[in-house]
């Protein structure tokens, strides 16, 4: 099927529109990319894009939206196996494969072997066990997964029901699921792929329960992939997204493994059933791992959102609708680009500012993390709790912004956002689990709130606090733990315009808001006896207010690394001010509630709205160069709407024509079958009836 | 594949938990259903459920989540053809088929023939044309679709580029798309199914453009379904949802049709090219049709949300996580149902109250619509504009609440919400277009805002206003068009508790908020010269504030049809008060902004929060009976989590085991193929290398 000949060219063309947006750039796009995307990510992306471009037959996404789940998994396995082969040839590293998966938006069945199985062995296996399990794992001679969650137990790890019981008679462990609720569930790479599972199970020795511990259980033959005796295993079926991953279930029926299969770095069971825990292992180290996983999520969420904002901002600058309704005139009375409408700008431009804030935060936060890890390694654990609390808040904040940001980008593309060719839909489903895993965003906020509550209580009791970015603002605004103790913070009495131009004042306001909320919550809990459970809604808000401050602070910290004369700064400062004002506007009810003289007035919130609109209109003019600076390839976007060449409609139509239903071979066969089975009997039933009567 | 024998029963069981929730009911569920679901819907649902249960082989959804798009379409066509056959046998009506599609969540390829093609012919064809097109259409001897939207033109119908040019020489019209942007796009039932399209095209006669008009164009042979000459037509590919519908594209290359094919009820082109419009056709009648479509969306959105709240509230009352953290004790120190956690309640219970508000609104609004239509038929058009403005606002309000309500329900189910077996995911995609079609929700809000702005301007100029529910509140709060003219509305000075117990006071507050926002916006536009484009953000908020009032008002109106002693009223009054308080809480920044003495204080908003929490906790106890009252069948829910018998985990696991990948026949074949193609080369590459070296 082909576009008929003889159609006129479109005038004005979408490609010209995009080119004209690019012509407005007031900064160098390559220079901006070097600043906003961290060097590690940039280097890997460039390498990965090069490797992928050298085998365009294997690394091809053109048909991916047409595929059934089975075909998608086949496609992902083909790509996954090819990447492993390239790795074994030394042409790509294991870390770069993670980036390739991101570019291709393919979370394939080999993923959890790399992401969970190998790291767990590295952290929790003894040298003897590493020889036994890690070495073949690194060589892909066995394929692993990490089986913790059960169908009835997600957040509550202590409540797991799978048992791992020491059998002294045979020097083995017996791993067993006593009921359906204990069935392992959601385990990535388990459904079809894994030959081995690290199973989290209640360790029971001589009738005593030592809590959840990891044990390696072989589940499928490496020779023929058949499930081993006592193992019921399979794929847990289709999902909202992530369908190339074989998330699986596992039921073990009194399965025996040798004693050596229990991960023994942090706990040991001897031949005669003595349980011991090695000395000088600080359990706080595991916090470090959790924080590291979350620094990665923060970075990934920046890239996830960048894909969506790139598509939406390019497309809305090309899509035209109605003439003379936006405030800007168009040449020859052409329809206006929809990005010139106030409501489209309001939905996209602050999101773009957030995207910049996230990229900057991810760099500043990673630096901060590395500093803390250095302290940790020298035996100083003082910064760990704050780091963990902040990481939890940032994981929640960035994943919420990114996931619902994709939704905004889809909706702002109108009907075309609903097409798979927008690139935003499979991607939405594939990215969605980030708000659930590694701590559901709602559950996670309690970690951040708990830390803040504890600090405020300590201040009230006059206890000394550790020195860190959080306690710094709490001490400043709540010297005695009470907000009333500060008569009026520094921003009081200043115009919004002057605050928006002063990074220090912005941070002062945002941290004052978080401190006031923390103090109020502690009042409710400690003075009015409000239970933890009844405080959960307030904790979400407190967690987000803290994160608003932290993101702003990291954003500014990253901007401060630029020389004062940098040509990037004018637009970056606008983005930062816009981000600040939008945060205020979204949370104006918090501002009205600020205590005493700090409480905002209607006049002030109107000032915020006015200044925000003005900045949105200014940044809109640089929107396309700003998303171009993310540097995402067309393969990465895989979108008809967001293509870098701006040839939107032609390619969108051509892509649709490639749908299997439209093809001359298989499409014709399907359509003929349907005509004979369904359409013909419907269309010709009156005729058939007549003939039957004759 | 089967669940292994010998597993212990789960204790406490999910089924027992659900039964115990039901035991708490303080009202009769069947009686509540009769009150909250309108009679027409109830009757049709009961009939449809009966018809569907009589052929469980055809009307079976068990495998639907496993299907590829092609298989899903085949399944939908089979069901669609069967329903048409049942209709021809007189066992189901065309209207009931619409409800069957809703129950099955299948928007199949025959849908637009019924929903758009036939109604357009009924409204716009002359008797002669009805004989020619409508009669065979009603008999399904031709299959139609309605082709308006173009790839480059959605909201702006006047901007369509397809032309329909009169050719006097042959007494024909030539229908033509001049460029790719004019390609018809998104047209339901066009991709594979339709034999005829009603094409909206610029009517050109003797070089003069008479604007977009509908013309019937045969596009595929009814004998063999092959596209006719000059027709390029196909399916436009996979989408975020709605994938059993064959949305299509259409390019017509100078296609000729007889003159009679132009729909001639509202415009006529004579043999010699004279264009005339018949007298006594009031164009306002088309408003009536648009409003009717939107009353239907309001009703549908109530049912859409009911499916999601039923699943989420049943499931969260059975799902347990952590012990001793919710405020209520559990027997034997069992884990607490997650619905006992404050954050889960806060996300679900106000949504349940909204769901009740929507069902009540849909009934009261339909009554109101019918009254207006009766006036219209007697030549009184006074109520039409208000009806239209309110319908636009309600379409936006209800579809936003329903679509993002499904998302909330999915997320609150944790990981399991992400499984297709939750019933919430395909369904989310299939329901999502409601925020886009029939007026994108963002564009649509301008209709409501425009009406309110016009009324305020008229008040300021001392002009007379029509009498209706909107002008009633505007007149009350803005007698001269200015909010300042009312020194303090009636609710000022009253406690939140007393307002929440007084329906009149609630409506007074909500309407005062909308009136104040309307007045402020008119000030900005008329006094400060703010452009329309810069007012769009404020218009969204104004539109929603108006709708908050309208929904509350309709909710109360429907409750007032119950006798004062009705045993349903205690819980319904709680739901209404909860809905009111939640609306205030969500929009507290509007309350702080209210003018003069009406402006809320921090003490008042704290009172709102406290009372809201208390009501949420009370309504939570009735949550399962309240969703049971929606009366949705298990077929309708098609969910492992929301099953009426509460056997969650067993069925969830069994369903997963039925996944094609796990089956002994096809599953084994796929897995063996993958093992040989991908896993074996990865697992055995070291071995292979060794052997190669030998």
Image (spheres, coloured by chain):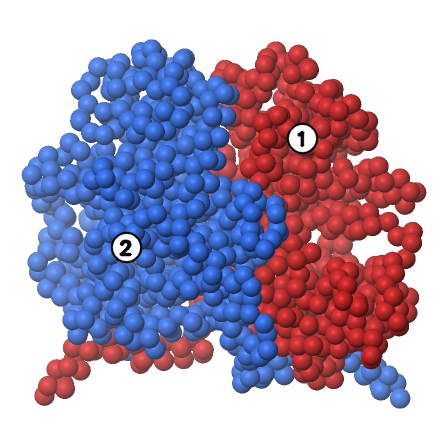
Chain colours: A blue, B red
Residue B292 coordinates in the image, percent (x, y): 76, 49
Q: Residue drawn 17% across and 33% down?
A: A383
Q: Residue drawn 59% across and 74% down?
A: A7
Crowding near pointer 1: few (<14 within 10 Å), some, many (20+)?
many
Left or right: residue B461 versus residue A339 is right
Q: To which residue does mark 1 refer? A: B549
Q: Residue drawn 19% across and 78% down?
A: B685
Question: Can residue B639 be seen from the camera position used here?
Answer: no
Front residue of B662 and A167: B662
Left or right: residue B129 versus residue B252 is right
Q: To which residue does mark 2 refer? A: A30
Q: Residue drawn 85% across and 40% down?
A: B381
Seen in the picture, residue B689 relative to A631 is either above or below; the reply is below
- Indicate the chain on which mark 2 is placed: A
Check the image and name the residue furthest to the front.
A332
Residue B46 coordinates in the image, percent (x, y): 74, 54
Residue B595 coordinates in the image, percent (x, y): 59, 18
Residue B173 coordinates in the image, percent (x, y): 78, 73
Left or right: residue A140 versus residue A162 is left
Front residue of B546 and B408: B546
């Amino acid at each position: 099927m082909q576009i008929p000949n003889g159609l006129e060219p479109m005038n004005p063309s979408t490609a010209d529109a995009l080119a004209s947006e690019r012509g407005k750039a007031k900064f160098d796009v390559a220079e901006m990319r070097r600043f906003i995307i961290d060097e590690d990510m940039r280097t890997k992306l460039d390498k990965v894009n090069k490797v992928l471009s050298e085998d365009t037959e294997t690394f091809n996404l053109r048909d991916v939206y047409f595929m059934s789940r089975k075909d998608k998994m086949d496609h992902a396995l083909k790509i996954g196996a090819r990447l492993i082969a390239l790795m074994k040839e030394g042409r790509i590293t294991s870390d770069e494969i993670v980036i390739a998966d991101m570019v291709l938006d393919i979370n394939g069945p080999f993923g959890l072997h790399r992401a969970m199985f190998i790291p767990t062995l590295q952290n929790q296996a003894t040298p003897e066990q590493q020889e036994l399990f890690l070495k073949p794992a690194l060589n892909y001679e066995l394929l692993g997964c990490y089986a913790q969650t059960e169908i009835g137990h997600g957040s509550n790890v202590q409540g797991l029901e799978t048992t791992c019981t020491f059998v002294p008679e045979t020097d083995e462990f017996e791993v067993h699921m006593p009921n359906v609720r204990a069935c392992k569930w959601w385990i990535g790479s388990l459904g079809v792929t894994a030959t081995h599972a690290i199973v989290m199970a209640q360790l029971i020795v001589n009738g005593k329960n030592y809590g959840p511990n990891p044990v390696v259980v072989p589940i499928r033959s490496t020779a023929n992939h058949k499930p081993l005796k006592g193992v019921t295993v399979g794929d847990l079926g289709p999902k909202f997204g992530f369908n190339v991953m074989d998330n699986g279930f596992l039921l073990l029926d009194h399965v025996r493994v040798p004693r050596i299969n229990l991960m023994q770095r942090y706990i040991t069971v001897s031949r005669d059933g003595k349980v011991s825990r090695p000395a000088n292992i600080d359990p706080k180290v595991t916090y470090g791992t959790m924080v590291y996983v979350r620094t990665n999520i923060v970075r990934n969420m920046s890239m996830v959102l960048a894909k969506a904002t790139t598509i939406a901002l390019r497309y809305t600058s090309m899509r035209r609708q109605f003439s003379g309704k936006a405030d800007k005139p168009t040449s020859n009375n052409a329809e206006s680009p929809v990005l010139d409408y106030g409501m489209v700008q309001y939905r996209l431009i602050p999101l773009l500012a957030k995207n910049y804030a996230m990229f900057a935060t991810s760099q500043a936060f990673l630096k901060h993390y590395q500093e803390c890890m250095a302290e940790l390694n020298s035996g100083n654990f003082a910064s760990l709790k704050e780091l963990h609390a902040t990481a939890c808040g940032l994981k929640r904040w960035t994943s919420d912004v990114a996931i619902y940001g994709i939704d905004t980008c889809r909706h702002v593309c109108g009907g075309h956002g609903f097409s798979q060719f927008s690139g935003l839909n499979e991607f939405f489903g594939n990215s969605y689990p980030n708000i659930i895993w590694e701590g559901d965003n709602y559950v996670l906020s309690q970690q951040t709130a708990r830390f803040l509550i504890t600090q405020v209580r300590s201040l009230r009791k006059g206890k000394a606090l550790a020195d860190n970015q959080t306690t710094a603002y709490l001490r400043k605004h709540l010297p005695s733990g009470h907000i009333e103790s500060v008569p009026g913070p520094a921003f009081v009495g200043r115009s919004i315009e002057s605050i928006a131009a002063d990074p220090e004042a912005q941070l002062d306001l945002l941290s004052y808001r978080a401190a006031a909320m923390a103090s109020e919550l502690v009042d409710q809990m400690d003075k009015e006896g409000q239970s933890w459970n009844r405080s959960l809604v307030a904790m979400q808000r407190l967690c987000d207010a803290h994160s608003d401050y932290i993101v702003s602070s990291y954003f500014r910290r990253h901007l401060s690394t630029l020389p004062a004369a940098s040509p990037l700064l004018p637009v970056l400062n606008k983005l930062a001010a816009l981000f600040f004002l939008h945060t205020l506007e979204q949370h104006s009810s918090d501002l009205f509630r600020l205590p005493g003289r700090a409480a905002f007035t209607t006049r002030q919130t109107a000032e915020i709205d006015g200044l925000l609109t003005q900045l949105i209109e200014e940044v809109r003019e640089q929107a396309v160069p700003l998303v171009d600076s993310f540097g995402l390839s067309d393969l990465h976007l895989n979108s008809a709407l967001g293509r870098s060449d701006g040839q939107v409609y032609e390619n969108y139509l051509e892509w649709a024509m490639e749908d299997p239903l439209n093809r001359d071979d298989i499409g014709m066969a399907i359509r003929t079958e349907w005509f004979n089975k369904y359409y013909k009997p419907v269309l010709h039933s009156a005729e058939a009836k007549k003939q039957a009567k004759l």
